Image (spheres, rainbow, N blue to C red):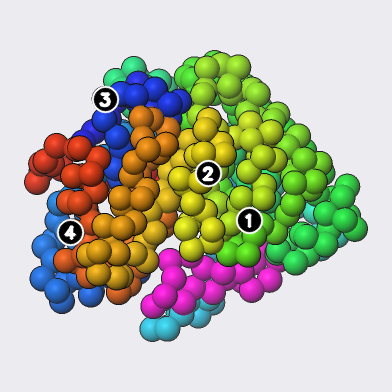
């Protein structure tokens, strides 16, 4: 079902719209399409358009909040197993083709303040960061019912892209002035972008990508979040929320339980994908944080089991405190390999039945809801 902008905003603000939302956040993990094809999946099942997933039409603010460098990405080596490139930060990147869709850095440009000062201008504001022609089109799209998505760089993720996780985590203690200058710079750029954007169109959903946790917990604790990330988040969230934005969503894998309070204090209103294998139980989280909207939370690995495993998972997650608004039911990340097309069909149909959703049209299409 296609949701309206107004209904989606209401749903994410815990207003019951008359139905629950059931979707896919990300889609298939690489390689699963081959498995499903061998099991007789149709073309529409392979692109997920056969399943009637809920989604809301959206447009993203046409602005570049990140690096604008003089470096031109190039391919160093490309074979059947992997591809090695350089990117616009000058990093050497390696993509393992058979198992990944995102290349991983093999080196990083920053270790010291001098390194940062040498490339700081890449992150400073320029008027050409905003595509003003497309911005006018975004305003028209919002009037036609599209959800407008605004983004910002991660307060942990962007320094990590520049330094790597180990160097960053040490630098919070040994080079705090470096981290503060990075975050102040990207905040200043974002504020100048939104100062211009908000004169044309309001933002419906501000989103930030962090991925700052693993199964055992986050890489930063509440104290560091409060000292470094909160001032950065608050500058941007306060600016866009003052112009009517009511949804501030964060994408972070892993176990975020110990830092939920800290991020709520940063202004966050929604979190995803809520991975059960990492200890993120949306039922328990909703009990503890009744005003925090959640997306995902259905254990993707339950779909590798039998039908009773799937039923047990859905009957636990789809009911009680998670119902009535504020929850976007979905798998907690990409559909993993080993999930049969038969089990996936069962999951979709059972979920719709439990949620009381009507039959879906075979003419539907799939849109990722990871934002």
**How busy is the neighbourhood of tag 1: few (under 14 within 10 Å), some, or many (20 plus)?**
many
Q: Give the Cα separation between the discs numbered 2 and 1.
A: 18 Å
- Is 196 left or right of 165, judged from the image as shown? left
Question: What residue range appears in magenta?
Answer: 89-108
> Residues at badges 2 and 1 in contact (C-beta under 8 Å)?
no
The residue at the point 87 percent across, 50 percent down is 176
Q: Give the Cα separation between the discs numbered 1 and 4.
A: 32 Å
SS at circle 2: helix
Q: Give the Cα separation between the discs numbered 2 and 3.
A: 23 Å
Residue picked out by circle 4: 345
Q: Give the Cα separation between the discs numbered 3 and 4.
A: 25 Å
Q: Give the Cα separation between the discs numbered 2 and 4.
A: 28 Å
Comparing labels 1 and 3, the label whose residue is closer to the camera: 3
SS at circle 3: loop
Is residue 118 shown to the viewer in this render?
Answer: no
> Residues at badges 1 and 4 in contact (C-beta under 8 Å)?
no
Tell me where residue 130 appears, x and y as whole percent: 54, 32
- Tally the marks: 4
Residue picked out by circle 3: 18
């Amino acid at each position: 079902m296609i949701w309206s902008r107004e209904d989606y905003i209401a749903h994410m603000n815990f207003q019951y719209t008359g139905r629950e939302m059931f979707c896919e956040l990300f889609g298939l993990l690489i390689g699963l399409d081959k498995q499903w094809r061998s099991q007789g999946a149709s073309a529409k099942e392979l692109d997920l358009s056969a399943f009637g997933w809920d989604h809301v039409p959206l447009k993203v603010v046409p602005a570049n909040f990140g690096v604008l460098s003089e470096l031109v990405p190039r391919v160093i080596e490309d074979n059947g197993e992997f591809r090695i490139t350089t990117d616009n930060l000058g990093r050497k990147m390696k993509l393992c083709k058979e198992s990944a869709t995102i290349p991983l850095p093999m080196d990083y440009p920053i270790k010291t303040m001098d390194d940062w000062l040498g490339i700081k201008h890449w992150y400073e504001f320029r008027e050409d960061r905003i595509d003003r022609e497309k911005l006018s089109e975004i305003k028209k799209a919002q009037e036609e019912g599209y959800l407008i998505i605004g983004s910002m760089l991660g307060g942990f993720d962007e320094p990590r892209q520049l330094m790597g996780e180990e160097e960053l985590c040490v630098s919070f203690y040994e080079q705090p002035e470096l981290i503060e200058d990075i975050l102040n710079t990207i905040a200043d750029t974002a504020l100048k972008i939104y100062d211009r954007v908000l004169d044309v169109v309001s933002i419906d959903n501000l989103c930030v990508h962090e991925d700052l946790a693993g199964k055992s917990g986050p890489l930063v604790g509440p104290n560091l979040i409060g000292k470094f990330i909160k001032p950065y988040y608050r500058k941007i969230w306060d600016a866009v929320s003052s112009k009517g934005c009511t949804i501030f969503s964060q994408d972070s894998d892993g176990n975020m339980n110990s830092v939920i309070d800290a991020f709520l204090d940063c202004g966050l209103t929604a979190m995803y994908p809520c991975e059960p294998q990492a200890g993120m139980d949306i039922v328990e989280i909703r009990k503890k944080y009744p005003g925090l909207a959640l997306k995902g939370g259905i254990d993707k690995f339950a779909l590798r089991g039998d039908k009773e495993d799937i039923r047990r998972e859905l009957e636990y997650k789809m009911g009680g405190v998670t119902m009535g608004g504020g929850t976007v039911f979905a798998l907690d990340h990409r559909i993993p390999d080993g999930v049969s097309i038969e089990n996936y069909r069962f999951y979709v149909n059972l979920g719709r039945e439990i949620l009381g959703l009507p039959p879906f049209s075979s003419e539907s299409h799939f849109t990722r809801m990871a934002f």
